[in-house]
Amino acid sequence: MARTRTSISDLAQQLGISISTVSRALADHPSISDATKKKVWKLAKALHYQPNHMAAGLRKGRSNLLGVIVPHIDGHFFTMVVKGIEAVAAKAGYNVLICQSNEDVVHEQKNIETLLNAQVEGILVSLARTTRTFTHFEKVRMQQIPLVFFDRVLDGLDVSAVVIDDREGGYQATKHLLERGYRRIAHFCGPQHLNIYKNRRQGYLDALHEYGLPVVEELIFNCDMTLEDGERGIDYLLSLPEPPDAVFSSSDFSVVGALQLLKQRGVRVPQDMALVGFSNETFTSFTDPLLTSVDQRCEQMGQAAVRLFLEMREENDGLFSPRRVVLQPDLMVRGSSGTKPNQA
Amino acid sequence: MARTRTSISDLAQQLGISISTVSRALADHPSISDATKKKVWKLAKALHYQPNHMAAGLRKGRSNLLGVIVPHIDGHFFTMVVKGIEAVAAKAGYNVLICQSNEDVVHEQKNIETLLNAQVEGILVSLARTTRTFTHFEKVRMQQIPLVFFDRVLDGLDVSAVVIDDREGGYQATKHLLERGYRRIAHFCGPQHLNIYKNRRQGYLDALHEYGLPVVEELIFNCDMTLEDGERGIDYLLSLPEPPDAVFSSSDFSVVGALQLLKQRGVRVPQDMALVGFSNETFTSFTDPLLTSVDQRCEQMGQAAVRLFLEMREENDGLFSPRRVVLQPDLMVRGSSGTKPNQA
DNA sequence: CAAGTTTGCGCAAAGATTTGCATAAAAACA
DNA sequence: TGTTTTTATGCAAATCTTTGCGCAAACTTG
């Protein structure tokens, strides 16, 4: 019998009233008498009525869906951002559709298609590392769908975004090492077309500059910031005629790689080599020694991104003036960057 | 002007053909001539036509949405399960709605409401640790929506589920320690109403039994498996008149807690105390020593869960006979359970 | 050339809900 | 009692797409 779920018209029929009255009663519309409302609510509960969001969405031109694209949710950072997103989105009545690009631009394009197909009302995205063009986002723009970037933004793009002050983060991290007495500081940096890596590197340079230290190009190691890259990076640095006494890495993952290889080689951390990472991943508290890292206010970032979307949605005149929110990072000092003994 | 996006009827109007022809052309229906199809496709592309999934869903009575409830996505396990879920779901044309219960049964109830409201076609769920009743799932059953549990199932419930052979995992882990020469093996175990902890414990007991060893109740530490619980647990064990020489923990998190406290106290791992965890979290490869752990085939679990859902969907006669899929765990031996030196 | 088959396409209903406008009944007022 | 106002409800259109059925026209076949 009950091949189909109970709909609003079923309620209307059984109560002998019109469909529109039921609709309004369920929405607690003021122009419906309390008596009728109560009747409707009672029957709705009895019949386990479940409003059909698709029909409502169709009529109202809304889906209550918010799309999110992140590179991955393996680590701590994006996971927490997503948490922040979900919290605020839920409050605003949105369901969140999460897609992982797996750091792959082709995947990212597919994700966009998926989300557009699902009729999302907005898209929040943090770019894959391999993304260097913007073409696949044109479609989103064309359809007037609010688009908010977070953390990773393509450089020089005029879009709404919430980012942290990566330069400040890099600066603080490097300055911290300098204050602790380290003087020959290396840097692991990522693809320079991404704002985050570019700015962290800039912070590193600024700190060196402030201390009147020269920038030694051979101490800057370009890579993709994986654990293996960290191993390779430290291997390279140790092979130099004059190895560094500290490394500031733009990612915690490569720091772990570095740490493991250093231990293997018998280099003591932080006595012989200090390490500072970026992102404040959970595992920074699991290693030995614990890792100093820059915290990124992940949850706040997610919350801010949703709020930005909500603002853009309000301005339905279509010409969203791109806005930008900048969060302040926070250096978490732990064992891997202890005072340099011979300087103390 | 273009307040509304281009719809199928716009195409029809501009081409001077009927709506139904356009619909069928877009669907590549055989009874439409190639010429017409090409015309339609061309215009559709030119006008950036985006099919409205909600309208289609409404008509077909489908949403293409699959709901997932997990306790959290902080760690490695659920993250990977979700990855597996997404892969198979995407192939079957489903979008995935992910909810986190934060290990809280109240949240879990809300998640259910959310998903039902979103008109999901099925729900995959892994229970929060605090969930001890099933009432909030009744609604799902009532609406004939396929429900699949994975990993954490309420004990004694007759529902479809995909789990790993936790007993076997606990058995292998404990047997491994026994083979390596450890004889006084403690166990950190979680809430016994959850299948996973109960079965892991059973595996532990079985292995002891096989070796003819007595079960020492004071060596079994009941807790919630957090990092802090691990610290408390090891603190307790070390305070015993006759402390253990190894610990098998039902979670990697409490192993890390244990490891940190052991280091603090100067107890060597694995010489003085071997450790084996469960879940094969990413950070098991970041600690020193690396942690031996039981791998749970996370991605496979996610895939299997979706496949189970798809099967249930097929049997639209409504009486899904609950099915169960059991995956085999895999012991990953690492440094924390090295051979006991005085036995080697 | 008549009868039968295929091909290409349109009509209209259906799916669940919202909402502007109209209408009826009831209440208030003169 | 007649007129105005208020209150509660219904009608019907609108949202966009899919699909069963029917109708011609164009072929094929005997």
Image (tube, coloured by chain):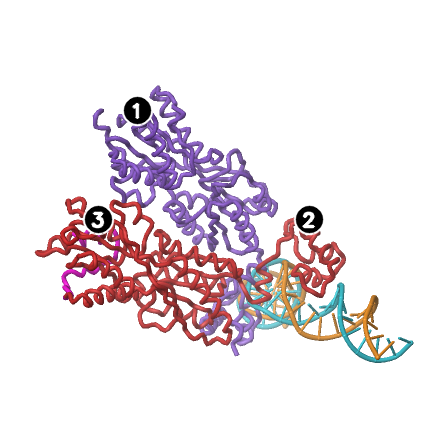
Chain colours: A purple, B red, C cyan, D orange
Q: Chain of mark 2?
A: B
Q: Name the residue beneath numbered marker 3.
A: B259
Left/right placement of residue A33 relative to residue A266 reads right
Q: Position of residue B209 (x, y in %)?
A: 19, 68
Estimate how packed mark 2 is, as few (under 14), some (14 to 19) or many (20 or more) residues with alpha carbons within 10 Å: few
Amino acid, disc 1: Arg
Residue B100 covered by magenta stretch: no
The residue depicted at 50 percent of the width and 63 percent of the height is B119
Q: Position of residue B343 (x, y in %)?
A: 15, 54
Q: Name the residue beneath numbered marker 2.
A: B46
The residue depicted at 26 percent of the width and 66 percent of the height is B198
Amino acid, disc 3: Leu
Q: What segment carries the magenta color?
A: B214-234
Q: Chain of mark 1?
A: A
Is residue A342 shown above or below B272? above
The residue depicted at 36 percent of the width and 55 percent of the height is B77
Of badges 2 and 1, nearer the viewer stands: 1
Q: Secondary structure at mark 3?
A: helix
Q: Position of residue A234 (x, y in %)?
A: 34, 34
| Residue at mark 1 to residue at mark 3: CA–CA distance | 34 Å
Q: Chain of mark 3?
A: B
Estimate how packed mark 3 is, as few (under 14), some (14 to 19) or many (20 or more) residues with alpha carbons within 10 Å: many
Q: Name the residue beneath numbered marker 1.
A: A183
Estimate how packed mark 1 is, as few (under 14), some (14 to 19) or many (20 or more) residues with alpha carbons within 10 Å: some
